[in-house]
Amino acid sequence: METNRNIDMICQHKADGSIIPIRIRMLDDDGAYQEYRIRSYKDLSYKGNIFDMPDVNRIHSTGIYPFECKIESFGCVRTLKLFYNSYEHTWKLISCT
């Protein structure tokens, strides 16, 4: 999976302001959309509002929400690091292991 790019996300915004990622969709190498259901996730915003991102030294923002999500792809569980930018209303895939 190509990292450091915007992705489509279906998520739930709860009444308390928290966000629950549900499903992601992204283009594969052949140009076809692939969908993955989020099996589990961790909201990493409790760590504060300073984040390390590739190609950027450090980001200090209260509008960036980091998540670590697990998906299943071809029978293997993969861990994704995602960021939600509330100012731009975009989700970005940062890393995949």
Image (cartoon, rainbow, N blue to C red):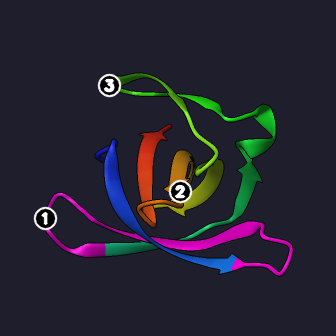
Residue 90, placed above or below residue 53: below
Q: In the rendering, at what x and y percent does residue 64 appear?
A: 57, 48
Q: Which amino acid type is shown beneath numbered disc 3?
A: Asp
Q: Residue at x 68, y 79 (%)?
A: 12
Element type where label 3 sits in the image: loop
Tell me which segment is drawn in magenta: 13-33
Q: Which residue is mark 1?
A: 30
Mark positioned earlier in the residue sequence (1 or 3): 1
Q: Nearer the viewer, residue 75 or 33?
A: 33
| Residue in view at x 49 percent, y 55 percent | 85
- Which residue is rendered at x = 78% and y = 66% of the image? 18
Left or right for 16, reference 37: right
Point out which mark residue 84 bears.
Answer: 2
Distance from Cα at disc 2 to Cα at disc 1: 26 Å
Q: Is residue 75 visible?
A: no
* Residue 91, picture quadrant: bottom left
**Residue 83's x, y, as percent?**
53, 50
The local crowd at label 2, few if under 14, some if 14 to 19, many if 20 or more residues have their Cα within 10 Å, is: many
Q: Position of residue 94 (x, y in %)?
A: 43, 41
The three-letter code of the residue at mark 1 reads Asp
Element under disc 1: loop
Label 2's element? strand
Residue pointed to by mark 3: 55
